[in-house]
């Protein structure tokens, strides 16, 4: 903690200030995560690889503002293979040999690559799988993002199979509120997730009460 003119800034203080500064930049769209996403999308488009940004950045793109420190992107198996063949060593490195995830070497931002046909959550098949990005991507501010319906469906499937992933449910509730979604929004979703959507929709109708 900094106290007075002669105070010493400790390592923990410096780390806190750095995180706080990054958070401020995040909500201005100039954080390391945003810059790394800009570069990643530019490379994927340059290579002609279909993609869809998922995770926290997609949640923001669909109206709920919250911080995130990494990038989730959906590719096909062929797209992943092409990206690794053409981009590794040119600003991106595998996190470890053979890893599906990579790291942006300019900004140090981790990138999780989700692959078409994979299973969200615990990986056990229940009917919901990661789709082909070309079939579900929508353009928001010049980038391709997972559509709102598919984002909610995958977050529900992830939360149902991995109870410790409470952020997925919190995101769904916030997206329902931000987009004024109705209970009928569940109708085109996979039957596996429809009951949980309707349950969370009910919670989303309750007023938000902030602590005093």
Image (spheres, helix red, strand yellow):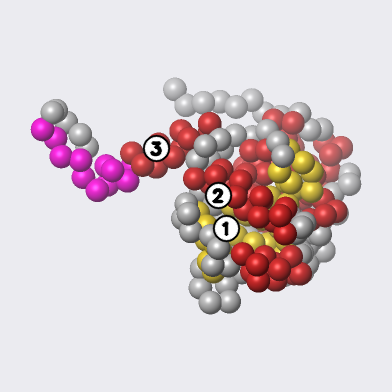
Q: Secondary structure at mark 1?
A: strand
Q: What are the residue bounds of the magenta stretch? A: 6-16
The disc label shown at residue 36, or none: 2
For marks 1 and 2 on the same chain, the one whose residue lies earlier in the sequence: 2
Q: CA distance from mark 1 to mark 2?
A: 9 Å
Question: Would residue 196 be visible to someone looking at this image?
Answer: no
Q: Nearer the viewer, mark 3 or mark 1?
A: 1
Horizontal side, residue 96 vs residue 55: left or right: left
- The residue positioned 20% from the left and 40% from the top of the image is 9
Q: Secondary structure at mark 2?
A: helix
Tell me the residue that label 1 is attached to: 111
Image height of 165 relative to 183, above or below: below
Residue 68 in picture, x, y percent from top left: 54, 45
Residue 66 in picture, x, y percent from top left: 56, 38
Image height of 7 relative to 69, above or below: above
Residues 192 and 67: in front is 67
- The residue positioned 59% from the left and 34% from the top of the image is 65
Q: Nearer the viewer, mark 3 or mark 2?
A: 2
Q: Badge 2: few (under 14), some or many (20 or more) residues near its Cα, within 10 Å?
A: many
Question: Would residue 15 be visible to someone looking at this image?
Answer: yes
Residue 207 in picture, x, y percent from top left: 64, 25
Image height of 31 relative to 107, above or below: above
Specify the quadrant that holds the C terminus. Answer: top left
């Amino acid at each position: 903690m900094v106290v007075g003119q002669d105070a010493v800034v400790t390592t923990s203080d410096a780390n806190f200030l750095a995180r706080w500064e990054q958070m401020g930049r995040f909500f201005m769209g100039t954080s390391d995560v945003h810059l790394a996403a800009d570069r990643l999308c530019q490379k994927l488009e340059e290579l002609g690889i279909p993609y869809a940004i998922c995770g926290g950045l997609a949640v923001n793109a669909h109206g709920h503002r919250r911080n995130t420190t990494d990038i989730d992107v959906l590719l096909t198996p062929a797209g992943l293979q092409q990206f690794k063949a053409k981009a590794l060593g040119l600003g991106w490195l595998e996190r470890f040999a053979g890893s599906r995830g990579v790291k942006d070497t300019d900004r140090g931002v981790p990138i999780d690559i989700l692959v078409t046909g994979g299973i969200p959550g615990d990986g056990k098949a229940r009917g919901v799988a990661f789709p082909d990005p070309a079939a579900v991507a929508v353009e928001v501010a010049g980038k391709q993002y997972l559509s709102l319906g598919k984002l909610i469906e995958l977050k529900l499937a992830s939360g149902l199979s991995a109870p410790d992933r409470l952020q997925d449910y919190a995101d769904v509730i916030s997206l329902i509120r931000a987009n004024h979604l109705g209970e009928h929004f569940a109708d085109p979703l996979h039957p596996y997730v429809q009951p949980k959507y309707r349950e969370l929709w009910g919670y989303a109708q309750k007023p938000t009460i902030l602590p005093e």
